[in-house]
Image (spheres, rainbow, N blue to C red):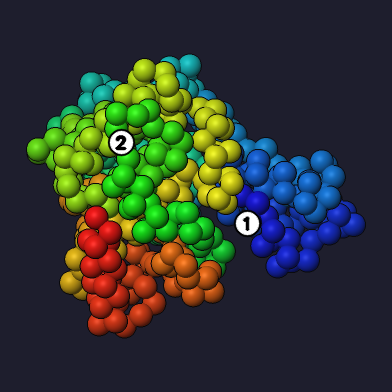
């Protein structure tokens, strides 16, 4: 994003007068912090329009990245290499095994297909390990590779694979490197990507609008934004999410897995009112009165949020903080639990909602940005506002009383 580009340019004093060889030294810095095409495109525009770098210089700093690496190409590279895949034993393909032939079927194979093929063809332990390593090689970095391995293990478990087959897909060195990437990412977010919001999107303002919406009228973009904050909703969940007596279903990250209901938790404590507002938005999308954010190219909503210096993913993160604030908090662990429930984090996963990288500069309506405090719901042992726990509890209780009075 443009803020990242600005920080890096200012940090290293980059100028359009520098030649390509000098600029190329900072390419890895840009790519490390710009993790998807949207962020890279925003950063390119900032470099080109804001700092007046030429198109050639921008291409050096932020080269085009393919979002998906072709598995056939990866296999060819492995087959043509005369060296081991890595020096660590955990990275090595077992002796006597050949990487599978780079067939068109393999190049288009999904992780689910791979899991089914492993069991269908009754692959040996060493064959499974080599297949898992090829899967790692197809990822752009260790973090993505670790995620793909986790998905493979989940698919294998659901298909009833033995523990021996599942365990052989674990690569400790890859996990270690993935953890380092995530730690570096967290530190970067804490330093450069805290979310600020205007008075229009403070908790008090959002809560007032949610309480006053008349569902007999068609919703507008503001209502869409408020409901997304209320339920920490992903764009892909706008149509699929359902609130039932058993909990919340239609969670986007289920990815075809059994749709186990998650605990209902949102800014709106009343389940019926929350369901009413969610259905209100879903009907507007289904009828065509409002566009579907779950489909690519929803620039109309981005333009609406740009006026407030926000993007859609910020709404989910702000909503997690507001949900934690509006519910009674007993201690940091309880705060973490509530935030995780707002995010519909899997309670069986004992890691915190750390992957959401939520750092919001929380402030009340009327407070200046300088009075805002970073709300960190992911830092182990130190979550919430940068305040002592007793003061944090007192402030959250006061805010809870205020929102109750506003009803």
Q: Residue at x 73, y 65 (%)?
A: 10
- Residue topped by disc 1: 4
Gap between marks 2 and 1, in whole Å? 40 Å
89 or 166, nearer to the observer: 166
**Element at label 2:** loop
**Disc 2 target residue:** 214
Between 174 and 19, the one lying in front of the other is 19
Q: Horizontal and vertical percent for residue 72?
A: 52, 25
Q: Nearer the viewer, mark 2 or mark 1?
A: 2
Q: Nearer the viewer, residue 47 or 231?
A: 231
On screen, residue 385 above or below 241: below
Q: In the image, residue 38 lies at what x, y percent?
A: 58, 40
Mark 1, secondary structure of its residue: helix
Image quarter for residue 202?
A: bottom left
Label 2 packing within 10 angstroms: few (<14), some (14-19), many (20+): few
Quarter containing the C terminus: bottom left
State the residue at coordinates (72%, 49%): 46
Q: Is residue 97 visible?
A: no
Residue 196 vertical position relative to residue 152 in the rendered view, above or below: below
The residue that appears at 23% across and 67% down in the rendered structure is: 401
Classify 218 as above or below 355: above
């Amino acid at each position: 994003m443009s803020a990242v580009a600005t920080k890096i340019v200012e940090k290293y004093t980059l100028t359009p007068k520098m030649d390509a060889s000098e600029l190329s030294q900072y390419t890895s810095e840009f790519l490390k912090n710009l993790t998807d095409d949207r962020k890279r495109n925003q950063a390119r525009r900032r470099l080109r329009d804001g700092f007046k770098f030429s198109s050639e210089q921008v291409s050096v700093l932020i080269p085009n990245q393919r979002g998906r690496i072709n598995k056939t190409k990866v296999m060819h590279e492995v087959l043509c290499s005369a060296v081991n895949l890595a020096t660590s034993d955990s990275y090595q393909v077992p002796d006597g095994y050949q990487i599978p032939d780079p067939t068109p079927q393999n190049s288009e194979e999904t992780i689910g297909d791979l899991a089914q093929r492993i069991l269908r063809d009754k692959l040996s332990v060493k064959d499974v390990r080599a297949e898992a390593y090829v899967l790692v090689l197809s990822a752009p970095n260790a973090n993505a590779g670790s995620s793909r391995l986790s998905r493979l293990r989940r698919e294998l478990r659901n298909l009833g694979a033995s523990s021996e087959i599942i365990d052989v897909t674990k690569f400790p060195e890859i996990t270690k490197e993935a953890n380092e990437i995530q730690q570096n990412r967290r530190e970067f977010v804490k330093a450069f990507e805290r979310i600020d919001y205007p008075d229009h999107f403070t908790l008090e303002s959002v809560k007032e609008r949610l309480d006053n919406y008349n569902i007999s009228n068609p919703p507008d973009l503001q209502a869409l934004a408020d409901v997304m904050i209320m339920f920490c909703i992903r764009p892909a969940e706008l149509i699929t999410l359902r609130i039932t007596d058993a909990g919340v279903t239609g969670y986007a990250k289920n990815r075809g897995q059994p749709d186990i209901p998650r605990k209902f938790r949102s800014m709106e404590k009343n389940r019926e009112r929350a369901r009413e507002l969610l259905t209100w938005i879903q009907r507007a999308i289904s009828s065509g009165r409002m566009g579907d954010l779950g489909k690519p190219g929803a620039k109309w909503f981005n333009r609406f949020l740009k006026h407030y210096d926000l993007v859609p993913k910020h709404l989910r993160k702000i909503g997690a903080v507001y949900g934690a604030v509006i519910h009674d908090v007993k201690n940091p662990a309880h705060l973490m639990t509530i935030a995780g429930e707002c995010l519909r984090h899997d309670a069986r996963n004992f890691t915190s909602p750390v992957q959401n990288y939520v750092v919001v500069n929380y402030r009340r309506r009327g407070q200046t940005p300088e009075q805002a405090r970073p709300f960190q719901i992911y830092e182990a042992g130190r979550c919430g506002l940068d305040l002592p726990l007793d003061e944090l509890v007192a402030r959250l209780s006061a805010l809870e009383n205020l929102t109750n009075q506003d009803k």
